[in-house]
Image: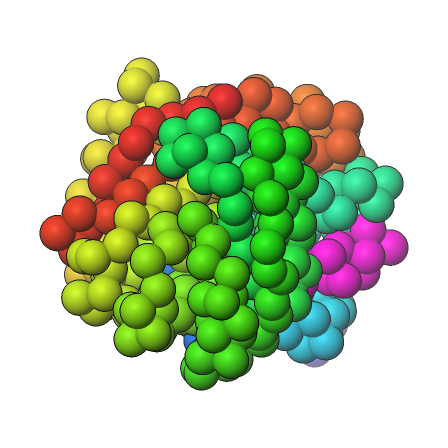
Amino acid sequence: MKSLRVIAVSSVLVAATSGLANAQESTVKLGFAGPLTGQNANLGKDVERGARMAVDDLNANPPTIGGKKVKIELQVEDDAGDPRQATQVAQRLVDSGVKGVVGHFNSGATIPASKIYYDNRIPEISQSSTNPKYTQQGFDTAFRLVANDGQLGSVLGKYAVQKWNAKTFAVIDDRTAYGQGIADEFLKSAQASGAKLVARQYTTDKATDFRGALTAVKGENPDVVFYGGMDAQGGPMIKQMQALGMKSKFMGGDGICTGELPNLAGVALQDRQVICAEAGGITPEYAAGMEDFKKRFKAKYGQDVVIYAPYAYDAVMILVDAMKRAGSSDPAKYLPFLQKTDYKGVIGETRFDSKGDLQNATLTLYTFNDGKRQSLGVQH
């Protein structure tokens, strides 16, 4: 009887252990990193919601990877948009066993973190980082879903000269990898198009008072002021330009191109021509799908999409799609399939070039009227 009990207990333990192993095998963990605190928290939470929405949609009808139904788990980390914190977050995600990463948000956080993912062979898709350096480091694990600063700056520089007939311009940037990068690209494009740089000033991504830099710029009376940075500074900067009596037109990249800018700039935005560019664009055939996504997002979270939630949503879907095609969530096995992605999602068709950049990347120019963003059309 004693031996029978031992056998029975052993059988239960084997079954339990086997069940635990199967449970472990049936969960695929992905990582998400972005600024969930700090001045860019509204943008970071936007992309986090997009990633969570994708995970919820996948788990509602669990995907099959390697012949097994799997549950997708998302480990969320806050990098606060800080390069040092981003590397700590990246190491934490690697140590926890994630099979892929969505993020980071800011180029200044994404670039240093990408080295850690590369060293550990973990694929990373940034839904928003635009600094060209991110995909120029030779890391075959790095991918992005948006146009880069070279493309954004080129289009904005040409627009300033050709559409606004700008002869002179000033540049202010926040000294981050993103802000300085896009400002430099705009400068090159505007100069190549025939305009003259009359002032170059700097601030930080935590500043609130820009009167020193703006006073120096005001003395040169430029046709256009370009700001390389985020909406948290861009909005107050427009206010302070108004207070100083500056008449210059205002430009920026996707960092200021948010629905929050009118709130940050207040009535000063109504009295100034402002153009910005979003590092993505929805072509007509995908417009209905994007509108459906925005409605579902609002119903789920009670919040409107800020900018990049749909891109984070597709980033999750693209990682899982590569796993399904590879029949494995092992990064070493699915990475070659990720590199050959041809995925039609909310943001359109995604295919990567040899560097991990988006093929046929689009961007959208916007202006602001009556406190709302207004599209000026998709550019290639």
- Decide which of 266, 79 is in the foreground and name it: 266
- Decide which of 213, 168 is in the foreground and name it: 168
**Residue at image point 63% right, 74% down:** 82
Which portion, as a residue range, is magenta?
A: 106-119
Rendering coords of residue 135 (x, y %): 74, 41
Magenta: main secondary structure equals helix
**Residue at image point 23% right, 40% down:** 374
**Residue at image point 12% right, 52% down:** 370
**Outermost residue toward the left in this view:** 370
Rendering coords of residue 269 (x, y %): 24, 59
Question: Was residue 266 drawn as part of the magenta stretch in this picture?
Answer: no
Whether residue 50 appears in this view of the structure is no
Please, is residue 4 above or below residue 21 in the view? below
Please, is residue 290 above or below residue 340 in the view? below
Rendering coords of residue 316 (x, y %): 51, 44
- Decide which of 223, 345 is in the foreground and name it: 223
Rendering coords of residue 221 (x, y %): 45, 58
User: What sort of colour scheme is used for the picture?
Assistant: rainbow
**Residue at image point 73% right, 57% down:** 111
Q: Quadrant of residue 218?
A: bottom left
